[in-house]
Image: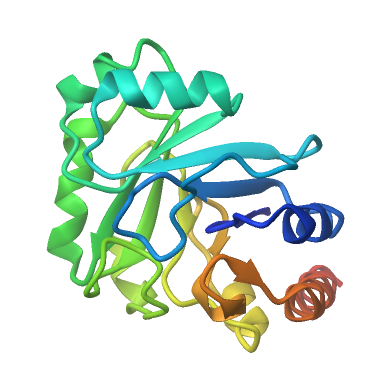
Amino acid sequence: MIIKVCGMREADNIRAVEALGIDMMGFIFWPKSSRYVSQRPDYLPKRVKRVGVFVDEDPEQVKRLADDYALDYIQLHGQESPSYIFQLGGLHVIKAFNISTAEDLLQTQSYEGLVDCFLFDAKGKSVGGNGEKFNWDVLDAYQGATPFLLSGGIGPDDAERVNAFYHPKCIGIDLNSRFELSPGLKDVAKLKEFMCNLNTEIQRYRD
């Protein structure tokens, strides 16, 4: 299971979260976000995949930041069209969708074969990082070929819920606001405890 921690910004916090053994780390380049990365941190992760999060940004700016931060993935959280993705010149892309009902999943059809992964988040006041859950049962209606990450208000007490969820195309989870001390600053102790509980639940399920 892929574990992605998004909304990182502070160098020491980046080091500490990286040391937990996560797989992906997200950096938000949307100026309206309270987790916006306005300047390059003094430290960037070396052992995890770097993900840059953008919302309807100019494609040339996306490519510049992808090069500057050595991003492994571009996460698109706005209204970016399939033609927009072609303008990114072959960068690896995660396309996020805000989900409330099964009908919302129809949005994904135009992106099949164009992106590496989808991210299913809850609808909220902002495009992401709202700390709100959605009914994961609606994902039973997803029959696409593209794998996805599960997001939307996953918190410290949700290890059992995560492991009770199954979909053949779900490859991991995205963690953000419910593990924060303040916007952009993650609670390392809570993340560590969650990951330990998650591993325990996974092992118990396998046994």
Q: Is residue 31 left or right of residue 190?
A: left
| Quadrant including the N terminus | bottom right
Residue at horizontal 71%, vertical 40%? 44
Q: Is residue 70 above or below residue 76?
A: above
Query: Which of the 4 quarters of the picture holds residue 80?
Result: top left
Residue at horizontal 53%, vertical 58%? 7
Q: Is residue 67 above or below residue 179?
A: above
Query: Which of the 4 quarters of the picture holds residue 191?
Result: bottom right
Residue most toward the top? 89
Q: Is residue 55 above or below residue 178?
A: above
Q: Position of residue 41 (x, y in %)?
A: 65, 44
Q: Nearer the viewer, residue 172 or 61?
A: 61
Residue at horizontal 55%, vertical 48%? 26
Q: Is residue 138 left or right of residue 50?
A: left
Image colouring = rainbow
Q: Is residue 185 left or right of residue 19?
A: left
Q: Nearer the viewer, residue 10 or 148?
A: 10
| Quadrant including the C terminus | bottom right
Q: Nearer the viewer, residue 199 or 96?
A: 96
Is residue 142 in view from this perspective? no
Number of dots carrying numbers: 0
Q: Nearer the viewer, residue 160 or 81?
A: 81
Query: Which of the 4 quarters of the picture holds residue 181?
Result: bottom right
Is residue 131 in view from this perspective? yes
Q: Position of residue 54 (x, y in %)?
A: 35, 42
Q: Is residue 63 left or right of residue 112?
A: right
Residue at horizontal 25%, vertical 65%? 99
Q: Position of residue 176 (x, y in %)?
A: 53, 67
Q: Position of residue 190 (x, y in %)?
A: 74, 81
